[in-house]
Amino acid sequence: MKQKLLYTIIALLSAGFVSAQKPWSLQGNFKGEKSVDVIEANSMTLGYASMNNTLAGFQFNSKVNTKIKFAIKLPKEYLATFVGNAITKIIVGTGGTTTGASVFLTYDLNGTPFNTQTFTPTSAQWNTVTLNTQYIIEANKDIYVGFAGTAVQGVFWVDYLSDYESAGDNFNYSTDGVTYVGWGAFGYNSPVLALVEGNTLPQYDLNLKSVNIPSVVKSGQQFTISGTVNNAAAATITSFDVQYKIGTADLQTQTFSGLNIASRNNYSFSINATTNETGASLPVTLKVTNLNVNQTDENPANNSYSTTIAASNTVFPRKFVEEEGTSSGCGYCPRGIVGMAYMKATYPQRFIGISVHGNMSWADPMIQTAYLNGLSGLGLTGFPEASYNRLIMDDPAAESADYYYHFMDSLSIFSLSTNANYHDATKTSIDITTSLTSVLDVSALSANLAYVIIENNVHGTASGYNQSNYYAGGSEVMGGFESKPNPVPAAQMYYQEVARGIFPSFKGANGSVPTQLTANVSANYNYKITLPTSILNKDNIELITLLIDNATGEILNADKTEVKNPTGINNLGTFIFNAYVENQNLYIESGVSETIHIYTVSGVKVYTTEKTPGITSVSCDQLPKGILIVKGSSGWVKKVINK
């Protein structure tokens, strides 16, 4: 997956959302050496970096005398099996021009360390610092293990190849050489490890690190349960079992053998599962057990996972929504423009893109302060960066396709269909009706509807419509931007999917979704938006509807529609009519209640169904292969191919 080489840091100030160039970048031409230190017997290293990786340069632009602090958090839950053993050494990766280096231990990042020790770094490699005063690990205490120093030439060293642990890596820096900006999460792996020694180190502790289970599955259809385990103890793991149970079905066991999971290493597993049950909240439990055939895990507290899933015979495709933070003044944001265009062209039925602009090198006239504030609350730290269904925040270039591949089989029990009409001929406001349908009875739904206005082909003449372009000169192919100047003149720029507002707020309208839904009975919500004056051409706007889970914040499903003429003018055009094949289903979308007929090209009727507004799915197994004609009784016709 593509690394984020340079982006921007975002500050939320009382005056609103502003951004400035993030003062660091990874330099691919810097490589450090692997450590030559020998790790003693009866010892383990704790941390998030890997000594098996070479180090990469982490440069604060051209700043000199840059102060930095890295620290890793070792949570008390993880340290529980190490209580009574000692942290005897701290291993850090440093650059050769680092001065004033020290390591430290503290209970509080903002407090005074209880153990600090200076050392002289070795050039560009891992350094092992033996503590003059060992720390005996205590019960029920979080520990931060850190490193501080000054980079004479502005270059430090990090390990960015290991799995990033957002809850464990922290950093604090000062580009003026005096004042630290404050601790924050670090976007790579802090080059800090703690070496623990003792006679009572845990031997068997396989941590169930992460689990991925679809939130919605189709009954009787295979789906994937995947996850990652981490060997948090000393002994190498050669096999383990995963026990799982779905709904009221019998407990299932799958064995993974022939492995070689060394201490602190991860292993990813995958299970093909099915359920024949239906329901909005089927319980799912999963447990890792039976290490190396007959060994008992010494820390069973981190071995289990439980959740609920929705399972139904009828499901809807879940739209893939990308909300991207970008700026015309951001030199790396062309890759977001290219990524968004690729996704829109490649996955037109499922992909919904939203470009949320902010200021950077100059004032961006398309700025959306309130929207950016909402994305910042999800973890947006710079430009270009994007949220995917409000579940994941990452780069908007290659990562878009990666995450789409992960989500493309993602399903929903909810169908959305929105009609949007200008209120009158002045086109200053739009009237909205959203129809929400669930294929299952839902008794305790907590969700809101939010509406986003986007404008396409946004073109202006002011300098703020120039696009900063660090890809100029052809150093990296980037969708044609490599052959354009820096900045790209406004005359050559036409911005797409530009957010013009999110209504009534980032989290949606309270009360817009009933707490109880009856299966296949639509719930309607009416809303009116006064259009922002920032819109340049109202013929180029579209309305996006987001169904947002209030508990998790994720987007459960979405809909995109054109804004049509006032009600009563071209009424049929106010609705979406569509049919397409995906995931072994034929999906039929319309905004009215009507009869749907499906014919072969020779005119033979092969299927008929009555549908309410929204999306209806038909299994492709029920239909003949080849070209099919889908007709709605309201008069629309679509051609599809069942492969």
Image: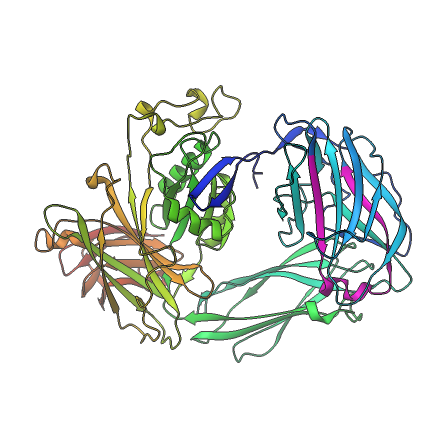
- Judged left or right of residue 148, residue 525 is left
Is 352 located above or below residue 60 in the figure? below
How many numbered marks have been drawn onto this rendered protein structure?
0
- Judged left or right of residue 304, residue 138 is right
Is 118 located above or below residue 208 in the figure? above
Which residue corresponds to the image point at 40% horizontal and 75% vertical from the top-left?
A: 444
Residue 163 part of the magenta-drawn span:
no
Camera-nearest residue between 573 and 257: 573
- Quadrant where the N terminus lies? top right
Visual colour scheme = rainbow
Q: Position of residue 553 (x, y in %)?
A: 45, 60
- Judged left or right of residue 58, residue 137 is right
- Judged left or right of residue 396, residue 299 is right
Q: Which residues are magenta?
A: 67-93
Camera-nearest residue between 190 and 607: 190
Q: Position of residue 622 (x, y in %)?
A: 33, 64
Residue 82 part of the magenta-drawn span:
yes
Observer able to see residue 236: yes
Residue 15 falls in which quadrant of the image?
Answer: top left
Is 501 located above or below residue 85 in the figure? above
Camera-nearest residue between 291 and 488: 488
Observer able to see residue 219: no
Q: Position of residue 526 (x, y in %)?
A: 22, 63
Which residue corresponds to the image point at 11% horizontal and 45% vertical from the top-left?
A: 426
Camera-nearest residue between 507 and 57: 507
Residue 435 falls in which quadrant of the image?
Answer: bottom left
Q: Position of residue 157 (x, y in %)?
A: 71, 35
